[in-house]
Every structure is written in structure tokens, then in C-alpha cells.
Image: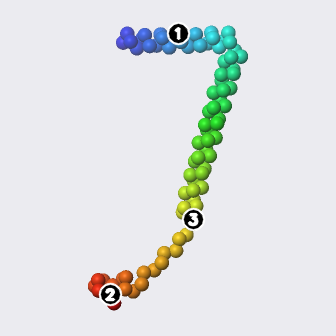
Amino acid sequence: MDSVLGLIIFFEILLTLGIVFGAMHETTLIRFEDRVMAKLRGAYARRKAQRQEKADRRFMEQATYTPVKPRGRADRSDSGAAA
């Protein structure tokens, strides 16, 4: 129980320091947030493009018809002997 309480107190102090730092260095914090958002948008756009490319490739594989050549009479005999 003591370790859980210690972790809670640690994270509360860390959060308080983060708020104080954000208030003192607002422009730095805003630049950091902008960089993080730009990276997240780029990652989202790349992931979306990959999913679309995969869907397009899957569609083309299903939409392409390849005719099956029928087997001849000799290939269909059950006796195994050539007719």
C-alpha cells in the first residue's frame, strides 16, 4: 500500500511541476505541442494511405478474372489408363 501511495504522490508532484513549467514557459510548451500534433497528423496520414493502398490492392486481386482452362477427357478418366 505504501508503494502505491508513493507512486500517486510522485505523479501528483510531477503534474504540478508540469503545470508550473507550462505557465512559466508558455511559448515553449506551445511549440512542443505543435510539433507533437504535426507528427501525429503525419503518422495518421501515412497509416491511412497504407490502409487505402492495401484495400485497393485487395480489391484489384478480387476484381481480376483469370480464366480456368478446362481439362481434357484423358485427364478426367477414373481408371488411370490413358484413353
Within 10 angstroms of label 1, few (less than 14), some, or many (20 or more) residues? few
Residue 65, percent from left and from top: 55, 69
User: As shown in the figure, which amino acid type bears the numbered disc 2?
Assistant: Ala
State which quadrant residue 83 falls in. Answer: bottom left
Within 10 angstroms of label 3, few (less than 14), some, or many (20 or more) residues? few
Which label sits on residue 80?
Answer: none
How far apart are the two marked residues, 2 and 1, measured between alpha carbons? 87 Å
Dot 3: what SS? helix
How far apart are the two marked residues, 2 and 3, measured between alpha carbons? 38 Å
Which label sits on residue 13?
Answer: 1
**Sequence order check: which comes first, mark 3 or mark 1?**
1
Dot 1: what SS? helix
Within 10 angstroms of label 2, few (less than 14), some, or many (20 or more) residues? few
Position above or below: 29 against 75:
above
Q: Hey, which residue is sitting farthest bottom in the picture?
A: 83
Q: What residue would you read off at disc 3?
A: 63
The quadrant of the image that shows the N terminus is top left
Q: Residue at x 62, y 9 (%)?
A: 20
**Sequence order check: which comes first, mark 2 or mark 3?**
3
